[in-house]
Amino acid sequence: MRRRRLRRLWAGLCELRNRKALTRDDLPMHISALKKEAGRDYRLVMISLPAV
């Protein structure tokens, strides 16, 4: 179960990285949705946000 959630989180983050039309406000919203889906497995991944 954990591996499946981690794989889905990783795929979602890679998709966000490749998306070009993200605004400054959309990025945290999408990351928080992925965080909610991943549950406590989210803490296994370190995410660095770009400075704006």
Image (spheres, rainbow, N blue to C red):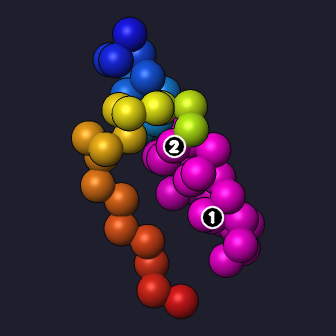
Q: Main secondary structure of the magenta part?
A: helix
Kindly indicate whether the residue at mark 1 contacts the one at mark 2 (C-beta within 8 angstroms): no
**At which x and y percent is residue 5?**
43, 23
Residue at figure coordinates x 41%, y 16% from the top left: 4
Q: Does 12 sit left or right of 23 as displayed?
A: left
Q: Quadrant of residue 23?
A: bottom right
Inspect the magenta stretch and tell me whether residue 16 lies in it.
Answer: yes
Which one is nearer the viewer's eye here, 26 or 42? 42
Residue at figure coordinates x 71%, y 73% from the top left: 25
* Image disc number at residue 3: none
Q: Which label lies toward us, 2 or 1?
A: 2
Residue receiving disc 2: 35
**At which x and y percent is residue 12?**
53, 40
Residue bounds of the magenta highlight: 12-35
Q: Is residue 8 above or below residue 46?
A: above
Residue type (three-letter) at the residue carrying disc 2: Lys
Residue type (three-letter) at the residue carrying disc 1: Leu
Q: CA distance from mark 2 to mark 1?
A: 12 Å
